[in-house]
Amino acid sequence: MSKPTVLLACDFSDRFKQLLTDRYKVLGPMPRSAPDALPVGASAALALVTKGGLQTDRALIEALPELGLVSYFGTGFEGIDLQAASEHGLTVTHSPGANASSVADFAMGLVLASTRQILAADRFVREGRWTGNSLVSMAAVPGLTGARLGIYGFGAVGRKLASRAAAFEMKIAYHSRTPKSDTACSYKASVRELAEWADILIVAVRADPSNYHIVDRSLLAALGLNGHVVNVARGSLIDADALAEALEQGMIAGAALDVFENEPTVPDRLLNAPNLILSPHIAFASTGARNAQEDMVLANLEAFFDNRAVPNPIDPF
């Protein structure tokens, strides 16, 4: 009996590709998620494995006539045309929560790096500027104890951020679509209200058309001169030009980005912006979190091909 065909929209770890190859005929990875980039034999693909930031639009769906499943590595699924998927009877799955601890850990690392100027301190030493007999070699900055952390998005990542921030003795508030009854953290009725309150704003919300570029010039101004913004969600949530301008003009104190709107391309203006820390979308990428997400994708594929209910369908769909 021949193996069912699975198409990879992007590259994945060697571990994951080997596990897939053991069970399926694997095509890809595609150089880009578009109909003109489909490999030979893709018309037979029954499942597409992809990630949230890649486009799975109507044209791609219709170029895959046998497609029955789109399985997302990670929580996000903003790249798919849900209407087209529904019309073609596709099952769509994701892997929620598996990377939440990893992302929360990394986000707190970015908070520390930005607020305590860790990268700047490293450069300070390497460039030979640590001289003299002063008690403080670099200017003192506010610490995290007592600082106000605003969490935009209070899902699995947001909740883990709150628990980690509590250990730093921070004040914590959040904004999400609805207030949560099972947390002592303060709820703010809007993102703007959260930014006005916060010293540090962490973006950890799922991206969709309603929050495109929601972190704009106005919101950054509300965050204020001493504010920091950290994004571990999706690049589309932040207006990159507005952020670069805010940093260039000193409208905010600093920022850290793990995600970008058109990955892996990073605008030159961001590359040259002061007080900005950049990382290549690796908040999720601890070994344990990556393996757990891969295993969830495998479980969704296995259930689909066994004609069982998939464990992680996108809801609502």
Image: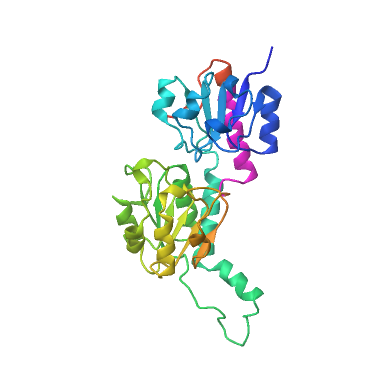
- Say whether residue 111 is left or right of residue 316: right
Is 298 covered by the magenta stretch? yes
Locate residue 243, reporting x and y percent. 42, 60
Q: Which residue is drawn at 39% across and 59% down?
A: 242
Q: Is residue 78 visible?
A: yes
- Residue 10: image x %, image y %? 59, 37
Above or below — where is 248 with respect to 294?
below
> How was the colour assigned to the protein in this rendering?
rainbow
Q: At x 36% / y 46%, what residue is drawn?
A: 211
Quadrant (top left/top right/bottom left/bottom right) for the C terminus: top left
Magenta stretch? Answer: 283-302
Q: Quadrant of the image for the N terminus?
A: top right
Camera-side residue: 40 or 122? 40
- Count of numbered circles on the image: 0
Which secondary structure dominates the residues rendered in magenta?
helix
What residue appears at the point 66 percent right and 74 percent down from the top-left corner? 126
Q: Position of residue 100 (x, y in %)?
A: 52, 44
In the drawing, does residue 306 fall left or right of residue 218?
right
168 drawn magenta: no
Q: Is residue 146 visible?
A: no
User: In this rendering, is residue 56 above or below 115?
Assistant: above
Residue 159 percent coordinates (x, y): 45, 46
Which residue is farthest bottom? 133
Q: Which residue lies furthest to the front in this view?
A: 36
Question: Is 30 placed left or right of 185 in the picture?
Answer: right
Up-down relation of residue 251 to residue 28 (above or below): below
